[in-house]
Image (tube, rainbow, N blue to C red):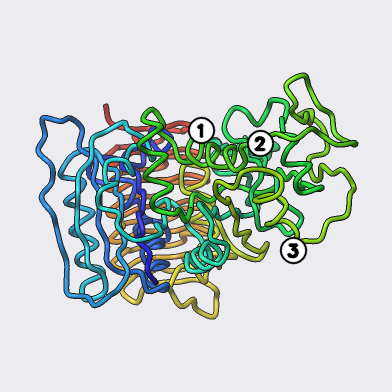
Amino acid sequence: MDFQVVVLAGGTSEKLSPLVSKDVPKALLPVANRPAISYVLDLLESSDLKDIIVVSKRRTSSIPALPPFRSWPLLANATVCFLQVVEGQEAARLVGAWISSAYLDRLLVEVVAVTEDIGTAGALRAISKRLVTNDVLVISGDLVTDVLPGAVAATHRRNGAAVTALLCYVPVSGPSDAASSGGKDKAKKPSRLNIVGLDITRQFLLHIVSGTDVEKDVRVYKRKIRAVGQMEIRSDLMDAHLYAFNRTTLQDVLEKKETYRSIRLEVLPYLVRSQLRSAPSGGEGTIVDETGNVIVPPNSNLQCLSQHRAIAPSAFKQDLLSSSGVETHRCCVYIAGKNKYCHRLNSIQAYCDINRDVIGEASHLSGYSFSSHNNIIHPSCVLGSKTTVGPQCMLAEGSQLGDKCSVKRSVIGRHCRIGSNVKIVNSVVMNHVVIEDGCHIQGSVVCNNVQLQERAVLKDCQVGAGYTVTTGSDHKAESLARK
């Protein structure tokens, strides 16, 4: 497939503190004991997209760019640019070294550095000259999904689009962009993440509102309503941060709009807004303000806005892109089915949700074979007397559990030492963690090389790498990290 693919993968993130660090950048954060970026790389490999440029972020211009790093060999026609946003050369080397080792003879990897704090659009702008194919696939490195990028690319080519966005149904736990880190907040109704307007064939993107604007009145240009006769307004779909762009259109926007920093909040809305240049008058059945925009109050039913005028689906391309205005470009969507998994790892709550799902209802993403008890216990693990490991659990190699321990719906990493009478529920325990006798861990994330001394209790906590939780201490909804 003649596509270049840019993978945008963050390095450090305040939303993921204290889980990420200079030693564990976001791309290497373990999800079901696999680096997060591996899920995207496997997805690309399955679509035969294997030649990768890794663009690494360096903190200041005084730090020299990381020299190109390559793993090889590989025969592939497509080029994939993997945009790795990390702080400092050491993190970039960690990611590059891991990819080289894990995907030896499978992927060709090059590491390129860009400056910090330029946003996703800025990162694309920095590597724009490297983009040479007719179309470019851009995917967020924190996306965990089973939707094949090739399906989005095929839709993009079929419609001759300037941009095609992957839209997925909002996860049951709520949109990850709005997720909180506290377990008690999970039951709250999540805020809307996006408001999108679609034609009746649900192929073309006519309107999109993201970010803080979702709580304001929805304003729809009446020329679009008149062109299509019917527009469906949806608030149950999220932008999955996977886009197919026409290269020349993308490069033109990045050049003309030098201040744009975000693909989701600026580049995509700009392309959607500028699909038509003319502005015919509005029709009946719409609420129009003095500027000629259709208004939908934010508390209204957002499922469908329509003039109730029948229109044949095949008429859309002609009506919208020809007779109703000056054709500029087409913005399309690929809507994943409700049975597809789609979640972004961009908050602590999302991290916990994804780990739970990948060893649960979305276990097909893990790449592992589960036992008859619906769990994974590495053969090298040692379990003490009367210790139980329930379904939807994962124990990695070299870990040891003492007597009378209980593990439920949790992931335990490599070479952990766990004492007796320890209870671990709905938690993620990373590598080389020491948990002494009598500790209780619930709804928490425990990072590498942490030590929990005897009878320590954690509930809805995050513990940064190398931290020591003292004997008998009781922590609830806290973030614990070394200063």
Instruction: Name the quadrant of the C terminus.
Output: top left
Q: Residue flagged by tag 2: what amino acid is it?
A: Ser
Specify the label residue 278 is tagged with: 2
**Disc with the residue nearer the chain's start (2 vs 3):** 2
Q: Residues within 10 Å of mark 1 (few under 14, many from 20)?
A: some
Element type where label 1 sits in the image: strand
Q: Residues within 10 Å of mark 2 (few under 14, many from 20)?
A: few
With 412 as the anchor, is 393 left or right in this view? right
Q: Residue at x 70, y 56 (%)?
A: 318
With 223 as the anchor, is 253 left or right in this view? left
With 171 as the anchor, is 347 left or right in this view? left
Give the x, y percent position of residue 453: 33, 42
**Disc with the residue nearer the chain's start (1 vs 2):** 2
Residue at the disc numbered 1: 476
Give the x, y percent position of residue 140: 42, 50
- Disc 1 to disc 2, C-alpha distance: 58 Å
Give the x, y percent position of residue 241: 49, 49
With 71 as the anchor, is 165 left or right in this view? right
